[in-house]
Image: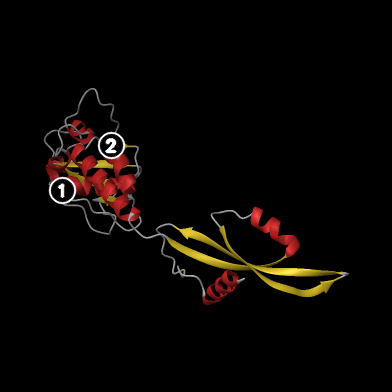
Amino acid sequence: MAEKSPDPSGSNGRRCPALSPGERLQPSGSGSSKWVRLNVGGTYFLTTRQTLCRDPKSFLYRLCQADPDLDSDKDETGAYLIDRDPTYFGPVLNYLRHGKLVLNRGLAEEGVLEEAEFYNITSLIKLVKDKIRERDCKTAQLPVKHVYRVLQCQEEELTQMVSTMSDGWKFEQLVSIGSSYNYGNEDQAEFLCVVSKELHNQSYGTNSEPSEKAKILQEQGSRM
């Protein structure tokens, strides 16, 4: 349970579990207190010693055991100070509570992995790595999509346009549309240039097939 200020309110507006008068008098590091208060990057979390001690090899287990080799400071409320990202500590703490990895929208598995490795929670490290591999495997199997564009240019601009194409765009087809107008004493030939670009594992609503105009131009170019 997280909270933004030293008062006992949770981050979702819920109250932290009520403590008995005896427990309220106990500092966070007291071995007789069931509840432990953590200040992670300025956000307060209230949980039990039993939860933090799920993994006997973890940083949090050592914190609860008052390991003399562990340099741990407390703030003015008696909460343990941990200089880490509270956004990703939430999923770590919930994993210790119920053994499941639950990620809110916008959170990346890599962020949880960083925290799991910092706290040395071995089972969570393995779980997150498996999920990352599974995600990457599914992503790699998605078909490659293409987007097509048709560019109109004059003959004198053609070489420069093709040579300066960047950001993944590739030349596909060149269709001559003849001399559309006379500039000075010279006829200016014009072309339609069809270019394409791969969209790797993205779905922005872009039509992955060539437009009807691009298809017609490609058919005309193939007959020339």
- Image spot of residue 136 (x, y percent): 32, 50
Residue 58 against residue 167 in the figure, above or below: above
- Left or right placement of residue 195 versus residue 144 in this view: right
Report, in whole angstroms, how far the alpha carbon at label 2 lies from the one at label 1: 16 Å
Quarter of the view holding residue 118: top left
> Disc 2 residue type?
Glu
Quarter of the view holding residue 216: bottom right
The structure residue drawn at horizontal position 25% and vertical position 45%, both measured from the top left corner, is: 128
The reply to whether residue 197 is visible in this rendering is: yes
- Image spot of residue 212 (x, y percent): 52, 77
Quarter of the view holding residue 184: bottom right
The structure residue drawn at horizontal position 22% and vertical position 41%, both measured from the top left corner, is: 126
**Residue found at the very far right of the displayed protein:** 185
- Image spot of residue 174 (x, y percent): 62, 65
Determine which residue is flagged by label 1: 99
- Left or right placement of residue 178 versus residue 203 in this view: right
Question: Local crowd at mark 1 within 10 Å, few (<14), some, or many (≥20)?
Answer: few
> Disc 1 residue type?
Gly
Q: Along the line of sight, which residue is nearer the eye, 20 or 174?
A: 174
Determine which residue is flagged by label 2: 117
Indicate the secondary structure of the residue bearing disc 2: helix
Indicate the secondary structure of the residue bearing disc 1: loop
Which quarter of the rendered picture does the C terminus lie within?
bottom right
Residue 198 against residue 133 in the figure, above or below: below
